[in-house]
Amino acid sequence: MVKFTILARAADSQASRSSLARAGVIHTPHGDIETPAFIPVATKATIKSLTPELVRDAVDAEAILANTYHLYLQPGVEIMKKAGGLGKFMNWSGPTFTDSGGFQAFSLGSAKGRASKIAKNKNDDKPEADAGEDTLRTRLARALGIFQQKNIRVSESVSADGYRGDSFVPMARVDDDGVTFRSIIDGSEHRFTPERSIEIQHDIGADIIFAFDECLSPHESYERQKTAVERTRVWAERCLKEHKELGLLHTPALFGIVQGGRHEDLRKKSARDIGSMALADGTAFDGFGIGGSFDKDDIGTAVKWVCEELPEDKPRHLLGIGEPLDLILGIENGIDTFDCVAPTRIARNGCAYVHPSAGEPDETGGRKDRINLMNARFINDLSPLDPGCDCYACKNYSRAYIAHLCRAKEMLSATLLSVHNLYYLVNLAKRFRQAIIEEEFEEEKKRYLAAY
């Protein structure tokens, strides 16, 4: 089990009275997580291009989050049980999280590009690309192709982008009991229910696990979001019951999930439902995850709606969102932990997070918090990625060298950029944690945002 201790609140400072930011500690069987904290994502029991030692020592991360959907498919939960759990399997001695696997399964049932967690803005129908969705669909299409080549009958013949002719083909089917989906490994059919997701997560053996929920695109209608909120509520109770029945001596902490899209009434209702949920014997959620989809321009507002309704004495995790500005807005509005694949994904594409004072606007005038090493201006730039960063990459290598690695397609480029990007986010959270403790949160936020 885990315990959560709140050490300081930003509201204790006169300048930050309206802030919900707080600094605390999540105590787990494998160590403490000082919050606010960014949690790197080890999707398949590995953070791409990094060893666990680098994640611990060079990134300075305290915990990692793995993905139930992917681990269930490969290598399977039996080998992790035999190894003694996720941490021992991947040689990570610190705290571990697993998500429920629901988002990945549900994204296979959404049209290409429509299952993103963040829409760019209220008037834009084209969401920001979310990590892994198109990759999942492409890999699944290839797996179905393997089935077809072996003359094994499958129900759909689809292209690599998930279409049959002009029609989109859902690769997952959702009903009131769960979701049926195909494996991205071999195209075989599988099914997740709330009970099955909890059982798999218990077998994986993380310290903190999440309830199974229905996650929709930000572009779904109000009525669909309303249905998902109710389905998520029903599934949350089923998850609690299964979690209790599976309880062992070292039972993981179970976090409930809040849904509701970008709708204030639905978000608040979901938060009240999940926040107050308890079984007859008092069994309740140990913390909460805020899931689903947001508008990029008002992510802080939607998060605040939820955090104002959730119990004050339990930790809150923002699922799958955690770029620099998202982190600051989330902390300000009551989030304790974050996870996101973006820092390692953009690293593999040659991009680095930088303090906005060290960045340059792109052609649209935005994104001052990152640079793209593939741009020609970095070929002869012998300065570090971010002059104010103390990470291993910044202390030892120049922009020019890493730009060379990117252009030469050397694997070391992904390693150095991943170390830097993760370190940047982990220590950005630590920086704001210290500001909360020192009653300087508002001043620190203004200094950072002024650099944009």
Image (spheres, helix red, strand yellow):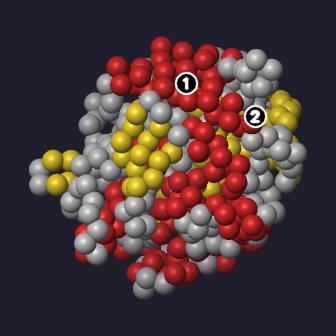
Give how far apart the Cα atoms at labels 2 and 1 are. Answer: 16 Å
Q: Find residue 319 and report its horizontal and vertical position in percent.
A: 57, 41
Q: As shown in the figure, which amino acid type bears the numbered disc 1?
A: Val
Q: As shown in the figure, which amino acid type bears the numbered disc 2?
A: Lys
Residue 164, quarter of the rendered image: bottom left
The answer to whether 450 is drawn above or below residue 302 in the figure is below
The disc, 2 or 1, on the residue closer to the chain's N-terminal end is: 1
* Numbered badge on residue 234: 1
Residue 123, quarter of the rendered image: top left
* Numbered badge on residue 244: 2
Q: Find residue 265 and report its horizontal and vertical position in percent.
A: 48, 14
Residue 79, quarter of the rendered image: bottom right
Whether residue 31 is visible, yes or no, is: yes
Please report the residue visible at 83 percent of the width from the left and 34 percent of the height from the top. 4
Please report the residue visible at 85 percent of the width from the left and 36 percent of the height from the top. 3
Whether residue 431 is visible, yes or no, is: no
Q: Nearer the viewer, residue 179 or 207?
A: 179
Please report the residue visible at 36 percent of the width from the left and 74 percent of the height from the top. 376
Q: Nearer the viewer, residue 286 or 279?
A: 279
Horizontally, is 364 left or right of 58 in the view? left
Label 1 Cα crowd, 10 Å radius (few <14 / some 14-19 / many 20+)? some
Please report the residue visible at 24 percent of the width from the left and 49 percent of the height from the top. 169
Q: Find residue 118 and report its horizontal and vertical position in percent.
A: 42, 40
